[in-house]
Image: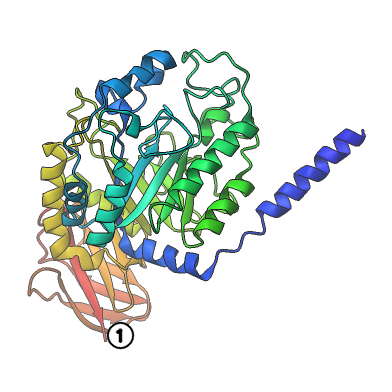
């Protein structure tokens, strides 16, 4: 009985500690900047890129960890060019980059002192994180790091209770205290040696839960997030923490992400959670895979990506759009060409995205709205049947017009909103934008 009572007391203390997180002023400012930036590049790249079958290839092909680690002999990204990566993102209108530092295969994309399973032990020998951090600073792009909580190669990770990586050949008994120490050591390196980091993007919590859709989604282990999160906020108070656990936010987190869906949607079966008051982000691939997959040619079109970006903004969320560079370090042309087109659209219509929040009218079948302090933007993505557009709110309207043109539209101000005569509007491109300017 004493042990039971002690366990309950420990749980209550842990819960109380977890719920006392108060973000710093610097963190609050970082959240606002994050929401203003709206558009980022996700980069899935590492030793798994060599096999050209996605980032889950070790698990999916049931590769033994000793065989998998032979990839250090063939992973040699001689064409990696940090300037080209950052320029590709910047020219597309992206304001930040989130790079995989360690995925579920445990391979570290930097010169970590915590493990020999790392990129500097390949023939490449260099630390791409240092090169990328320097280039992001040079070009004015913020940098965040993805970090996997689970590991298919380490014996100390609690693989016995995990759902994935079962065929990797681990036999030693796991030891989460040792694994937690390892993670803390790596996170300290990432937040100490590479300048200001905008976010730590965690993934892998779901390995210790029942599958999405199950009534019981509690974790089989205590991840000790209070220790992990407090370490991050201590090292860099402005650094935002997000966790792709597919659950409601946990105290200590600074933004909430949705995988392969916009907030409020769940076509992927991964986003059962509801949108919180935290800054929101939708992470979505440009084809079907996250990591380089040589057979995947199901590329999203330029129109699709623009409409996804606009749809995210209209739901008060960012879009983190993923590319999976090849093993040589090059972002393939199919991604670069489409992103260049996206960049041209953003240059013309970016004011309706950057610095905005979700508009006065929630997502509609025909499109969405966004707003800032001086404008409401009506994004028409699909053909509408009715001729009038009613936007609710109280406004002193100066002008209503088609963005990117000199065309003004008739309107009338009502007691509870603005009615726009849209009979003359012809849809053009992926998004026809009507701008309402206030006095």
Instruction: Describe the element under mark 1 as helix, strand or loop.
Output: loop
Residue at position x 58%, y 49% from top? 250
Q: Quadrant of residue 179?
A: top right
- Number of on-image labels: 1
On the rendered image, what quadrant is the N terminus found in?
Answer: top right
Residue that sits furthest to the right in the current view = 1
Q: Is residue 436 above or below residue 281?
A: below
Task: Return the residue at label 1.
Answer: 396
Return the x and y of residue 269 as percentages of the image width and height: 42, 33
Q: Is residue 388 above or below residue 89?
A: below
Asked if residue 407 shows in the view, the reply is yes
Residue at position x 43%, y 39% from top? 112
Q: Quadrant of residue 297?
A: top left
On screen, residue 217 versus residue 201, left or right, reads right
Residue at position x 47%, y 62% from top? 238
On screen, residue 322 versus residue 152, left or right, reads left
Residue that sits furthest to the left in the current view = 406
On the rendered image, what quadrant is the C terminus found in?
Answer: bottom left
Return the x and y of residue 345 as percentages of the image width and height: 13, 58
Q: Quadrant of residue 336?
A: top left
Q: Is residue 238 above or below residue 75?
A: below
How dense is the environment of label 1, judged by Cα within 10 Å: few (below 14), some, or many (20 and up)?
few
Asked if residue 310 shows in the view, the reply is no
Return the x and y of residue 110 as percentages of the image width and height: 36, 39
């Amino acid at each position: 009985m004493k042990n039971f009572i002690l366990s309950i007391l420990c749980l209550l203390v842990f819960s109380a500690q977890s719920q006392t997180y108060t973000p710093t002023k610097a963190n609050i400012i970082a959240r606002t900047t994050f929401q203003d930036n709206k558009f980022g590049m996700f980069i899935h790249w590492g030793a798994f890129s060599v096999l050209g079958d996605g980032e889950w290839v070790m698990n999916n092909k049931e590769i033994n960890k000793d065989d998998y680690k032979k990839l250090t002999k063939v992973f040699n990204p001689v064409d990696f060019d940090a300037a080209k990566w950052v320029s590709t993102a910047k020219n597309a209108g992206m304001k930040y980059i989130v790079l995989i530092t360690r995925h579920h295969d445990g391979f570290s994309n930097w010169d970590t002192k915590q493990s020999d399973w790392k990129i500097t032990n390949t023939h490449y020998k260099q630390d791409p994180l240092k090169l990328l951090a320097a280039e992001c600073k040079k070009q004015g792009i913020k940098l965040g790091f993805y970090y996997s909580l689970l590991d298919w190669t380490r014996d100390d990770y609690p693989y016995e209770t995990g759902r994935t990586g079962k065929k990797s050949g681990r036999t030693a008994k796991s030891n989460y205290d040792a694994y937690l120490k390892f993670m803390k050591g790596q996170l300290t390196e990432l937040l100490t040696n590479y300048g200001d980091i905008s976010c730590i993007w965690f993934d892998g919590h779901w390995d210790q839960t029942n599958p999405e859709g199950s009534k019981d989604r509690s974790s089989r282990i205590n991840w000790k997030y209070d220790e992990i999160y407090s370490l991050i906020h201590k090292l860099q108070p402005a650094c935002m923490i997000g966790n792709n656990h597919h659950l409601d936010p946990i105290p200590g987190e600074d933004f909430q992400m949705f995988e392969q869906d916009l907030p409020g949607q769940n076509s992927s079966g991964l986003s059962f959670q509801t949108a919180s008051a935290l800054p929101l982000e939708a992470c979505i691939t440009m084809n079907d895979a996250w990591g380089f997959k040589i057979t995947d040619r199901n590329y999203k079109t330029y129109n699709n990506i623009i409409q996804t970006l606009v749809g995210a903004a209209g739901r008060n969320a960012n879009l983190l759009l993923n590319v999976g560079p090849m093993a040589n370090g090059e972002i393939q042309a199919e991604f670069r060409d489409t992103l260049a087109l996206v960049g041209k659209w953003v240059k013309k219509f970016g004011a309706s995205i950057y610095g905005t929040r979700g508009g006065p009218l929630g997502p509609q079948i025909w499109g969405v709205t966004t707003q800032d302090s001086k404008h409401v933007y009506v994004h028409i993505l699909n053909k509408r049947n009715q001729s009038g557009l009613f936007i609710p709110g109280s406004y002193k309207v100066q002008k209503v017009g088609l963005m990117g043109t000199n065309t003004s539209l008739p309107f009338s101000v009502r007691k509870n909103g603005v009615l726009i005569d849209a009979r003359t509007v012809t849809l053009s491109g992926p998004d026809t934008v009507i701008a309402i300017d206030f006095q």
